[in-house]
Amino acid sequence: MHDESELLALRALAWLVGNDELLPVFLGATGAGEADLRARAAEPEFLASVLDFLLMDDAWVIAFCTAEGLPGEALLRARAALPGGADPHWT
């Protein structure tokens, strides 16, 4: 499941990079630069941050899942399998 989750997160990163409106929001929110996207794409923690970002807005989840032909809960399941995904969120 872990490998599948990383692959889905890579798909999410690719989708995010192709989204001209959302990519600058991600970069601004995370402090990452475009070079970080390439350099850190293999790091499970960075991929988890991509999913955390997308999961902040239902519209982003729906847009990604629709574009990728995935069920709406796919991002949440993938996030749970990546580092920090089992941690409770009290917000």
Image (cartoon, rainbow, N blue to C red):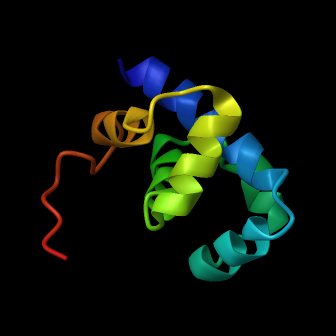
Q: Position of residue 85 (x, y in %)?
A: 27, 47
Work out whether 24 lies above or below 8: below
User: Where is the C terminus found, in terms of image quarters?
Assistant: bottom left
Is 33 placed left or right of 53 in the picture? right
Tell how many labels: 0
Q: Position of residue 89 (x, y in %)?
A: 17, 65
Is 17 placed left or right of 73 in the picture? right
Task: Out of 26 and 22, give the one closest to the viewer.
Answer: 22
Q: Position of residue 47 (x, y in %)?
A: 53, 46
Q: Is residue 42 visible?
A: no
Q: Residue at x 45, y 28 (%)?
A: 5
Quadrant assignment, res 82: top left
Task: Out of 64 and 4, give the one closest to the viewer.
Answer: 64
Q: Residue at x 48, y 66 (%)?
A: 57
User: Where is the N terminus found, in terms of image quarters?
Assistant: top left
Work out whether 21 lies above or below 52: below
